[in-house]
Image (spheres, helix red, strand yellow):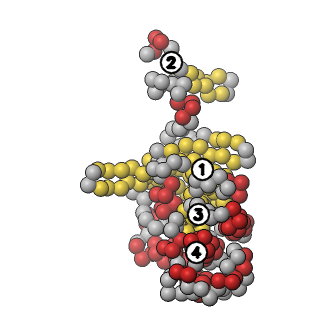
Amino acid sequence: MTAEAIDQGVAVRCDRLVKLYWAATGETQALRGVEAVFRTHTMSAVTGPSGSGKSSLLSILALNERHTAGDLEVLGRSVATMRTYELARFRRRNVAWVPQRPSEALLPSLRVREQLAQVAALRRRPAADDALERLGLAHRRDAWVHELSGGEQQRLAVLAATSSGARIVVADEPTAELDDDSAALVLRELHACAQGGACVVVATHDDRVVPHTDRVLALRHGVLSAEHRSGRSLVPIDSAGRLQLPPEALDLFPDDRAELVLEDGRVVLRRPSEDDA
């Protein structure tokens, strides 16, 4: 990625991203060539059914694990060329991660206010004194993590990420266990973080999240199958010219084949005639 691309707001670029997992039962392909760009000053949601590859994609975007093939560029650097220690340092300076289990992002030996101070110190930033107030946690500033409810832990984990000065914030199901009031606080915080210049990416099943995002990317079978923004639904076409038809469109082609016709600048897919069967 060039400096010009960074100036245009590209924070993360996924180029034919593949992720494989190996187990005694065989190989599982979680991602099958994902191509996507995530920009600064935006909040993107990644959706899809269980097993679609959401968690794998987010873990790779957060630099928690490496991809198997393809290329991942983050803030102008190719992740594949980084050594392990370089990747850890780069992640610590630039990326904040909110796991699905918030306790995994918090240090049990620190009080609430100390959690934020620790994150600020790691990135050499002053601690935000008003941050706890924004997420309704000011009255819990001296509490230990184990004294917090699950919802309070979730809000604190999000706050630690958004107030850290990270250029990329990645959150896995940040509102899943929250009531409407707490979810609204978290979503407002994430959106404000994006408006402040960060690239925010969340994986979610929660319909409450969508109105707060700039776009929604849908994954299916490890491939980007649709993009929704500004009330429009787009079908992504990858660099090899492939696209995924939605399930309702697939039903029109029971033989898994289609006739492609170019008509007046339009691409038309037709069910093959009986002669082609």
Q: Residues within 10 Å of mark 3 (few under 14, many from 20)?
A: some
Name the front one of labels 2 and 3. Answer: 3
Q: Residues within 10 Å of mark 1 (few under 14, many from 20)?
A: many
Residue picked out by circle 2: 272
Q: Is residue 17 left or right of residue 193?
A: left
Residue picked out by circle 1: 217
**Amino acid at circle 1:** Leu
**Amino acid at circle 4:** Ser
- Let me know if residue 75 appears in the view: no
**Amino acid at circle 2:** Pro
Q: Earlier in the sequence, mark 3 or mark 4?
A: 4
Name the front one of labels 4 and 2. Answer: 4
Q: Earlier in the sequence, mark 2 or mark 3?
A: 3
Residue picked out by circle 4: 149
Q: Secondary structure at mark 1?
A: strand
In the rendered image, the quadrant that contains the C terminus is top left
Q: Earlier in the sequence, mark 4 or mark 2?
A: 4
Residue picked out by circle 3: 177
Q: Nearer the viewer, residue 133 or 163?
A: 133
Write the residue at 73% across / 82% down.
130
Q: Secondary structure at mark 4?
A: loop
Write the residue at 65% across / 63% down.
179
Q: CA distance from mark 1 to mark 4?
A: 31 Å
Q: Position of residue 178 (x, y in %)?
A: 62, 64
Q: Are marks 2 and 3 in contact (CB under 8 Å)?
A: no
Q: Position of residue 45 (x, y in %)?
A: 62, 55
Write the residue at 57% across / 47% down.
218
